[in-house]
Image (tube, rainbow, N blue to C red):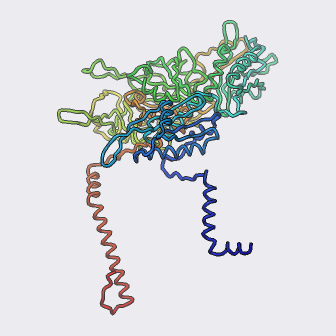
Amino acid sequence: MKKFLQWIKSPASDFALFVILLVLANIAFKNAHLRFDITQQGAYSLSEASKRTVKTLTEPLSVKVFFSDNLPTGYSKVYQYVKDILVEYKGAANRNFSYTFFDMKKPENQKIAAGYGLRQIQIQEVKNNEVGFKQVWMGLAITYGDSIEVIDGIQSESGFEYNLTTKIAKIISTTDALAGLGENDKITVSLYASDDLKQFRINGFDKIDATVQTAFNSVNKKTLNRLNYIRQYIVPEDIDAVSEKYGLQTFSWQNKDGSQGLGIFGLVIEHGENFRVLPLSIQRSLFGYVISGTETLEESMNEGIQGLLAKVKQVGYIIGHDEAELSDENGTSIHFVTLLSDMYELKKINLADEAIPANLTSIIVNGPKSAFSEEELYKIDQFVMRGGNVMLFCDPFNMEQQNYYQPATFTPINTGLNRLLSSYGIQLESSYVFDENCYKARQQTMQGIQSFDLYWAPMMSNRELNQKNPITKNLGYVIFLQPGKINTDIAAPDGIKRTVLARSSEKSWTQSQNIQLTPNIGVPYDKSTEKSEALAVLAEGKFKSAFDKNPAETESGAEDGLATTTHISQARQSGKIFVAGTSYITSNQLIDENCSEPVALFVRNAVDYMNGNADLCSMRTKGVSFQTIDKTTGAYARFVEYFCMFGLALLIIGAGLFVWRKRTIRRRKIHSVYNPNDSREITK
């Protein structure tokens, strides 16, 4: 032992100890990896949405990768990125996530890939100074239970994480709507019904507990016993607090002893901090009071659960006011629906005939041309009061043109929505915004290809887009068409955060009369009238109602001693209002067929943000940020050109002369200090 210790201390053991250290380090780091992502957008790091998706897997999910070997340089980089990002998924996921790479040289693996629906794609290859084409495999398949999703033709890193995460989320939600819940993580169904309400002989009240319990048992069986039912007994002192939290129906009356009676009624489903109030209420009829909503209670409960947990969400699409038709190929239809189809389903709602369903978290009002009634506006208002989110794409004018030879007429649109928006700190104006920084159309003429300024199509660069909000953070430019001005000069209500997402440049102006949408119509002579205008605005917070009471409610019932109201004057949950001054950004004119242009990304990011998927916004634009070149004057452009041609060379020559001069001075100083009488020159 003594000799061994001496050997350890001697230099003779250095090499052996070094080898042992390397072996131990390799064993320790065999399954570990450390990587620092210094890219601006975190292109090689997973977003929180991706981590959550794979961390909550309850069943085995497998990613099978089919990539050919010896890919050209540009495509081999994509293959390496897929490898690296799958390592990140594996590190963030639980034990139910796995991935496998298949050797595509083997015919049996090619048959497996074809069985999943993958196909070989043709790519360009430069080899031996010749340009040729090569058939390769570049895809993957995701399997979860009996379900399969594929991503084929992966030729770029841009958007890969977003595509993979959304495919995984879709396959999970399709297979099991409750896959995100743990074993003991249950949804609570709570019935609030004050016993004091029995004295008013409300039809069905004595059986309401059994009615809800029957619907609960049926739904709970379908959801694998993931629900928990509670019959809440609330003392009068706590009624205001419960009503303030959930916005439930409350009652008041005068007791025989002169004291005031208080009651509450409603059904709530809750998971974590999220909840839904189901359409179960007490209404007055010709024969007294009756409980409304029991006939569709099971359906409403299912819808509410889906609204809380479903990965594929329903979004309400308001109709009945000449909005853009989803089935109209020349309007919003195909491209807009395709843009949202992977995660959202648009559900048409006619507010004149129906209420907004309980399972919806957001609604879209897209290009209305006629006015909303008071009752319809009230339904939207109360939806916001319950924490709902509203997206408005509103045009300032209705443009009509009889034929090509006659000028178009522009009629201001008055929908009545300003009554709601003004109370939220936003106001729509009846004026178009024109901008010198606009889209330039190119057209073949007799004089050749000419460029035309379309001033009514502002082209906003990243300077005009809010770089702090996830909706517009990574976008380099967005084009709007015929946008209207959004007035944000009015004071925002207390507690409301208002954000301008997109604005025109400082070289823009508004016009409400004598409107002409023709190329090169000219710019204002008075430049003092030009200023930046808001074109898309987001408001967030707990809004205050624009109504004092429900316009459909009457004073009837007070003579019976029981007064009730369902009106909510102050929001119980935070909501979001998104307003764009044009509906054309949802049309096929601006949303391309592949849904990959900046306008499409802007609209989709807005929908995701409004539905609680803000993480998807930055994930979608990761690696695809569009950068635009700053516009400059001709003199500055010529200066940069000549500087690049001659300036850099002159700088290098000047730097060389400076170094040469410094070295000469240094040699002379050395000579004068150490050998002043020597006449020889130091040359090196």
590 or 461, which lies in front?
Answer: 590
Q: Residue at x 77, y 26 (%)?
A: 234
Residue 642: where, in percent of width, then height? 26, 56
Q: Residue furthest right?
A: 257
Is residue 401 shown left or right of residue 207?
A: left
Residue 20 picture location, percent across and down: 63, 63
Q: Position of residue 129 (x, y in %)?
A: 30, 48
Front one among 592 and 332: 592
Q: Is residue 486 left or right of residue 658?
A: right
Please name the residue shown 56% across and 21% down the image. 378
> In the image, what residue occupies the spot 30% across and 88% down?
680
Residue 13 seen in the current view? yes
The answer, for residue 570, to whether it is visible in the render is no
Q: Is residue 317 above or below residue 630?
A: above
Q: Residue furthest top?
A: 287
The quadrant the N terminus occupies is: bottom right
- In the image, residue 34 lies at what x, y percent? 57, 53
Q: Quadrant of the C terminus?
A: bottom left
Name the residue at the front extreme. 107
Is 483 left, or right, of 41 in this rendering?
Answer: left
Looking at the image, residue 196 sits to the left or right of residue 104; the answer is right
Q: Nearer the viewer, residue 668 or 155?
A: 155
